[in-house]
Amino acid sequence: MKTEPKTVIEAGKAILGIEFGSTRIKAILIDPDNKPIAQGSHTWDNQLVDGLWTYSIQDIWSGLQDCYEDLRIDVRKQYDTEIEQLAAIGISAMMHGYMAFDEQEEILVPFRTWRNTNTGQAAARLSELFNFNIPLRWSISHLYQAILNEEPHVGSINYLTTLAGYIHWQLTGSRVLGIGDASGMLPIDPDTHNYDAEMVKLFDQLVAPRGFSWQLTDLLPQVLSAGEAAGTLTEKGARLIDPSGHLRAGIPLCPPEGDAGTGMVATNAVKQRTGNVSAGTSSFSMIVLEKNLSKPYTMIDIVTTPDGSPVAMVHCNNCTSEINSWVNLFKEYQELMGFPIDMNEIYTRLFNAALDGDPDCGGLLSYNYLSGEPVTGFAEGRPLFVRSAGDRFNLANFMRTQLLAAIGVLKIGNDILLKEEKVNVDRITGHGGYFTTKGVGQRMLAAALNSPISVMETAGKGGAWGIALLAAYLVNNDRSQSLADYLDTNVFAGDTGTEVTPQPDDVSGFNTYIENYITGLNIEHAAVKYKRS
């Protein structure tokens, strides 16, 4: 017999997952059956400060507390009770980036997020040194770029971590990081499940002439895999989450993870030959590999699942933000005309209109580059909509080009994996805001990858649910069950979602569109060069 949520909460058996996304902090409370029973959220946004994208330390903690307070309100409203004890907690956040601290645990420079593309010189040098693709957004790229720039703070670094690692550290006192998030700091050795020792050695030799008092491993968090103990909530940590004083200390936490890892968990894509595509503010695909790629590619990052399996990742800085801007324009038109405003209906009608567009968008082109796009070689971006006089310019084609542009860069990267490297994938699952309108984004992605795409009802629960599942795995796993088997048995129980297969006309049209898109990148280069900032 299923236990009522109120009883679960009052018995301290609920599990909390919190994820810091790019535009929203979200908390989900799940029961012992891994079902969400309450949630809370807080909206925030990055700021461009001195040319770098950041979130302030104050915004991190005020955002966490407001999100948790929203969860408490939901619990009181639904169940007339208070959260005091939990079975486990998990913290997740956007991967990568740079948070450097001194001995007094003070941040040395503002948090540099994944969105920054100022690390080109460092990433190129390290990629050559390691014979391994080192992306612009990885922590090691930020560290080495700061060294190359002779930033004075570098000599004072005592600890270097990601956003998830920082929050977890402050809540528990433990300087640890989940292996998936750690693989976005420095490459992981698949045999040792730790930072690649040879690359650590090469980096230390590279910077030795600088005379720093530290070596690289002195700065980095300890790497942990899913299911390993990662510390417990301290009294200080409990108050950082819940200033009201109700939440108790002593709760175990799972290893903190990045949003890529929680996306894999939320879509049951941690086994070999499975993959997922997350499409929201940014987009990325994750395909769990059976074997290593034949060579490094600048468009493809090698990271890991939360339990350490190698993953080919194509990460794109831009996805749905430009779509949102255009939808807001249509909203303004409705307001001007005095029509009722229902944002869900506006999105649904405009997304569905795209299905009536020409498969190649009638010649129209769109570039959604609000920021730089490393996969196509842009350190800076300019949003563009481009058409010629003879193109078929109508609403359906306009919306279709917005949808295709949102995953155009993703297609370019995945064409290498699926066409050149012949990577085998049995199932790809989509999740994120791009798939909210039923069947539309799913159909476009199927055309882009020329592969069936599944979307689960549960995928919309997102990364907060994914990290809650990892916290559940920590306390409910008997250590004989792999993460993949635990998810199959205890969470998804055979649910593979609703599948859409690619339509030949869509595939052909997308291929034509992407050829035009690649040719038109020269237009984007010109816009970046000549338009005033």
Image (cartoon, rainbow, N blue to C red):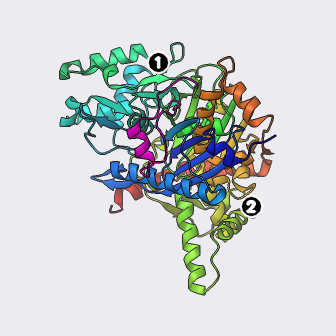
Residue 75 in magenta stretch: no
Amino acid at pointer 1: Asn
> For numbered disc 2, what is the local secondary structure?
loop
Residue for badge 1: 194
Expressed as whole percent of the image width and height from the top left, the position of residue 422 reads 68, 27
Q: Which residues are magenta?
A: 227-255
Label 2 crowd bin: few (<14), some (14–19), many (20+), radius 10 Å: some
Expressed as whole percent of the image width and height from the top left, the position of residue 104 reads 24, 34
Q: Are marks 2 and 1 in contact (CB under 8 Å)?
A: no
Q: Nearer the viewer, residue 238 or 324?
A: 238
Is residue 458 in view from this perspective?
A: yes
Q: Earlier in the sequence, mark 2 or mark 1?
A: 1
Q: Nearer the viewer, residue 497 or 178?
A: 178
In the picture, measured across the screen, residue 430 lies left or right of residue 147, that is right
- For residue 168, the mark is none
Q: Quadrant of residue 429?
A: top right
Residue for badge 2: 355
Q: Nearer the viewer, residue 90 or 418?
A: 90
Q: Nearer the viewer, residue 533 or 41?
A: 41
Is residue 278 in view from this perspective?
A: no
In the picture, measured across the screen, residue 262 lies left or right of residue 33, that is left
- Residue sitting at x 39%, y 28%: 175
Expressed as whole percent of the image width and height from the top left, the position of residue 499 reads 79, 44
Amino acid at pointer 2: Leu
In the picture, measured across the screen, residue 439 lies left or right of residue 143, that is right
**Prevailing secondary structure of the magenta residues:** loop
